[in-house]
Image (tube, grey):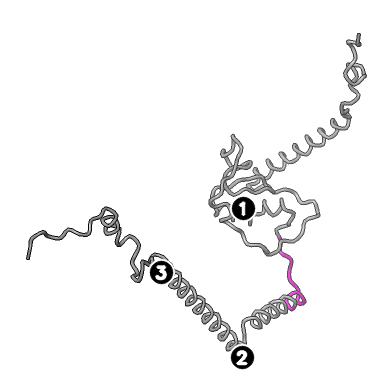
Amino acid sequence: MSDKKGSAYGTPATDTSFRRSYDLDEYAQKAKVRDAAEKEEAKARYEAKMAGKKYYKPMTGDETHTRARREIIDLEANVGKTVLVPAGAGQGKRGRSAGFYCSACDLTFKDNIQWVEHVNSMQHLRNIGETGEVRKATADDVHQRIAEVWERLREQKKAAVTTLKERLDMREEEAAKEREARRLKRQEELAKKKAEKEAAEKVKVEYGDDVRVEGEHDEDDMMAAMGITGFGTSKKK
């Protein structure tokens, strides 16, 4: 008989060495640090509220200066789409729900005006690692920006301007495409008429020296097969 206390893998049933072990002292220290940070933040929020100011996340020193937005805010990205939201969502701004969601601040806004205001707010800038202050541009920065804009305008102008010969070549190419399209259309019409004519000729059946349309003399053929030559009058003239 097999040992009732053993497992299918040949080890004792009470052996739990395969389970993950946790360092209780390490996690207790992490909990203390988290509680201390939460208490400090609550104290800072209370002091800011008593002073009539708005609380912002304290800077760590790794923040960068605020720069002009490089991308365009797409307010119509989710139009016509179905988005799954948690069952308890839609109560307040905290958390993800239906609307414009900010992952950096964990907030949801119901209209685009609030969303744009939040993106430009100090709270959002601090959470994405910006100080909210714009670095003062130097003379070299201004010259570099002017050179970049000027080069971009030159490229656009170069791409838009064409010579007279290029415009004539483009017009000749368009005319050739139009002629080819008309030629193909004429060929299709001729082929269609030819097919209709051949179909009409197949309907006609040669009968002796006469040419008759199929089905035109069915009654005469039936009368001839029955020996009836006609329905003439018996009245003598």
Which tag, 2 or 1, sits closer to the chain's start?
A: 1
Q: In the rendered image of this protein, does residue 170 appear above or below residue 219?
A: below
Q: Is residue 224 left or right of residue 234?
A: right
Residue type pointed to by label 3: Glu
> Percent from the top left, x then y, of residue 5?
89, 12
Q: In the rendered image of this protein, does residue 196 appear above or below residue 215?
A: below
Give the residue pinned by disc 2: 165
What span is in magenta? 133-143
Residue at (51, 76) in percent of width and height: 184
Which tag, 3 or 1, sits closer to the chain's start?
A: 1
> Percent from the top left, x then y, of residue 6?
90, 14
Q: Nearer the viewer, mark 2 or mark 3?
A: 3
Q: CA distance from mark 3 to mark 1?
A: 80 Å
Give the residue pinned by disc 1: 118
Q: Is residue 231 left or right of residue 149?
A: left
Is 140 part of what is drawn in magenta? yes
Is 184 part of what is drawn in magenta? no
Residue 178 vs residue 84, the one in the foreground: 178
Image marks 2 and 3: residues in contact by CB distance under 8 Å: no
Residue 201 disc label: 3
Q: Nearer the viewer, mark 2 or mark 1?
A: 2
Residue 158 falls in image quadrant: bottom right
